[in-house]
Image (cartoon, rainbow, N blue to C red):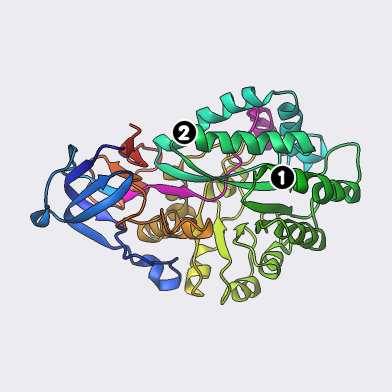
Amino acid sequence: MDAAITLVNLKGLVQVREVGQGRVAGGSMSELPIVPDAFLILDEGHIRDFGPMPSLPEQRGQVIDCSGRFVFPGWVDSHTHLVFARSREDEFVMKIEGATYQQIAAAGGGILNSARALASMSEDELFEVSVKRAWEILRTGTVAVEIKSGYGLAVQDELKMLRVARRIGRETPLIVKTTFLGAHAVPAGTTKAAYIDLVINDMMPAIAREGLADYVDVFCENGFFSPEESVRILEAGKKHGWRPRVHANQLGHSGGVNVGIQTGAASVDHLEHLNDDEINQLGGTDVMPTALPGAAFFLNLPYPPARRMIQAGLPVAIATDYNPGSAPSGNMLMNQSLACIGMRMTPAEVFNACTLNTAASLNMLDTHGSITRGKAASVIISKPMPSIAFGPYSFGSHWIEHVIADGKIIQ
């Protein structure tokens, strides 16, 4: 049984919500409830009680004085490729020298580069290099994460990735959701048609037999998978009980947003190229538009049009896209700063985007995304700071003092 922890003298308890609060959209994204001069009691892995300091009923277990500090719910990162074999800084240099994403891929780099490296690594070796990244993101406040496959591109290697992702969820305090992304690229030595058949007829049944996936995804982009191919793959995944997620409109107007709407996707992610018609079509759906500002920053692409989405009444989620090629950082703090600076989102909107809305997109609102009685005891204690805006304002700084995940103090 986890020992109780009582946090006292909080400057502010951030994102306090009632049971049943769903995602926030449009103007509601600027509303971020904060209880000043507060306490918070964590007990048996759950949020037990909170409120103004004068109403503190008792001090249970370990007591932490949070004078001058804000307490947030832990971040939920709803889009990562955290399991990979090695970094790709050589391609970083190629980008600096002018090569495009597509040119690097055509030369055997990109996703295929990561697939070759992963194929040569054992499952245990892959776990050892990947679990280090899990602890890294925990220290920057991420307590729940989605991890995709997609660097295997062969049955056994896709299985290997998803087994490692599940193992990270068992052997660290992170809550892990897994996504099958076999349709990430077409490996060398085959045709796209033959590979799609392999994804649907061989990979999916093998993954389903081991219960390794929660979602199915596809890289719907020019030069990768067309809208028609993407729909076929996602509909096949739905037969195994996996709700779709879609890589959409990163490199151009790929049709991925429409694919997400057509297939009832949980989210459409990237959205660097998004027009008003697509924004209007997303209205009235429960598809979560998810921005990955770190990827836009790293590839020097346009930032997703968050202001236009919010003004149209849409919700926006923010995730990191942590991967070796286009977003080699799982640091939510930096992505929050980029969302403010590059996407013109306010700090309140950003904190809603990476807690409530990412939790909603992963169907985790019962346990994560807000300070709510009964939810997981997974919170962040800031260093002393004047306001919540100081966090994203102080870009590049590590403004977290402690992370508590599932009732356990990580740092």
The answer to if 239 sits in the magenta stretch is no
Against 281, residue 341 (above or below) is above
Q: Which residue is mark 1?
A: 209
Q: Quadrant of the N terminus?
A: top left
Which is more N-terminal, label 1 or label 2?
Answer: 2
Look at the image and tell me in which quarter the C terminus lies: top left
- Residue lying at 56% horizontally and 62% vertically, measured from the top left: 289
Residue 10: x, y in percent? 18, 48
Q: Which amino acid, by three-letter code, is at mark 1?
A: Arg
- Please, what is the three-letter code of the amino acid marked with disc 2? Thr
Along the line of sight, which residue is nearer the eye, 216 or 71? Answer: 216
- Choose top left, top right, bottom left or bottom right for residue 147: top right
**Badge 2 is on which residue?**
172
Number of other residues with Cα within 10 Å of mark 2, as a class: few under 14, some 14 to 19, many 20 or more: some
Q: Which residues are magenta?
A: 72-98
Tell me residue 9's x, y (percent).
14, 47
Decide if residue 63 is on the left or right side of residue 107. Answer: left
> Image quarter for residue 273?
bottom right
